[in-house]
Amino acid sequence: MKRIAIFGSPGSGKSTLARKLSAQTGLPVVHLDRYYFNPGWVITSDAVFRQAITRAIAAECWITDGNYTTESQLTGRLDRADTLILLECPRWLCLWRVIRRIVSYYGRVRPDQAPGCPERLDWGFLRFVWQFPTKVERTRQLLLSLSDQKRVYFLRNKAEIEQFLATATTSEPEIGSSLLPPDRIDHA
């Protein structure tokens, strides 16, 4: 594993997993929020965002942390990644973590956030977190379609994440392997 892309709802643990993987592997973390937002929560233009990500993932090794799953935003990231991870934690847990994060960092910039973007209470964002499970299916299917070419993991809870971390640097699964239980594969 040299190029890892982590996806999942806000509050699912993407940044935490990225930091833990970085500590284990020495791979640098690319927090996509730092490229997507300018100070004051101003969104970067799509062209500038794509350029910044293209430069960041040109490196030999990296871990990306963030969604940004429109076709133009994914360009290059999926091609270059050798490992794809989707965190599928329950929505109530993600919402709880986001609220806890808001309380913990309110008015301050989190370590994984863009400079000049202090934590704040944003009802639209909380709604986005709650609705995230209804919007992630396209990403899930896309990652599933790549499972014969890349290492793809669908992790649902702390135990599965810890299991993944325990084996992430000690054994390399074959391409096409996945931590998706057979009962969760949609054969439709």
Image (spheres, rainbow, N blue to C red):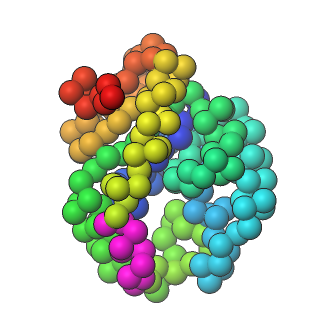
Image height of 26 relative to 7, above or below: above
Residue 15 in the image, given as x and y percentages of width and height = 45, 54
Image height of 72 relative to 5, above or below: below
The reply to whether residue 20 is visible in this rendering is: no
**Residue at point 46%, 79% (across, down):** 119
Q: Which residues are magenta?
A: 121-130
**Residue at point 54%, 67% (across, down):** 113
Can residue 122 be found in the magenta stretch?
A: yes
Q: Toward which corner of the image does residue 164 lie, by quadrant?
A: top left
Can residue 123 be found in the magenta stretch?
A: yes
Residue 98 in the image, given as x and y percentages of width and height = 34, 69
Q: Residue furthest top?
A: 174
Along the line of sight, which residue is nearer the eye, 13 or 48? 48
The reply to whether residue 185 is visible in this rendering is: yes
Along the line of sight, which residue is nearer the eye, 26 or 62? 62
Q: Residue furthest front?
A: 188
Along the line of sight, which residue is nearer the eye, 59 or 69? 69
Q: Toward which corner of the image does residue 140 lie, by quadrant?
A: top left
Residue 89 in the image, given as x and y percentages of width and height = 28, 50
**Residue at point 60%, 78% (across, down):** 41
Q: Quadrant of the C terminus?
A: top left
Along the line of sight, which residue is nearer the eye, 27 or 177? 177
Residue 174 in the image, given as x and y percentages of width and height = 45, 13
**Residue at point 70%, 32% (across, down):** 60
Determine whether, in the image, residue 26 is placed left or right of residue 177.
right
